[in-house]
Amino acid sequence: MAQVTITVRPNGPLRVDDPNGVVELVDLEGNKFDLTGKPAFSLCRCGASANKPFCDGSHKALFPAPVVAIKTE
């Protein structure tokens, strides 16, 4: 059985990979979010998503792309 994996994306959301559908996501009152048919989903970290707690890509306007040096030989 594959495990649940949560990946912190640089300047982005928390990516939840749940291949077996075992994760339950609940609000403050204990109401479950419908994750039916979602083996993976992303959770907002920036607070700008219009679809909280899920990421809608709004962070792209808030965080610049990381600068990475390209290795040359």
Image (spheres, rainbow, N blue to C red):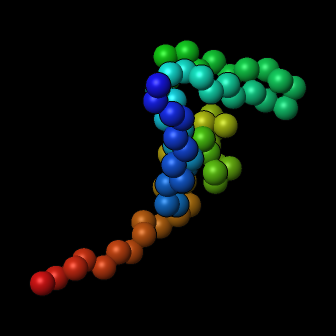
Please provide percent x and percent y for residue 29.
87, 26
Residue that lies at the very extreme toward the front in this rendered image? 1
Quick check: 64 left or right of 71? right
Which residue is rendered at x = 54% and y = 21% of the image? 21
Which residue is rendered at x = 16% and y = 82% of the image? 72
Image height check: is 69 above or below 22? below
Which residue is rendered at x = 63% and y = 18% of the image? 34
Residue 55 appears in view: no
Quick check: 32 left or right of 56? right
Which residue is rendered at x = 38% and y = 75% of the image? 67
Image height check: is 65 above or below 61? below
Residue that lies at the very extreme toward the right in this rendered image? 29
- How many numbered tags mark residues here? 0
Residue 33 appears in view: yes
Residue toward you, 35 or 46: 35
Please provide percent x and percent y for residue 5.
52, 40
Residue that lies at the very extreme toward the bottom in this rendered image? 73
Residue that lies at the very extreme toward the top in this rendered image? 36
Work out which quarter of the rendered image holds the C terminus and state it: bottom left
Image height check: is 9 above or below 25? below
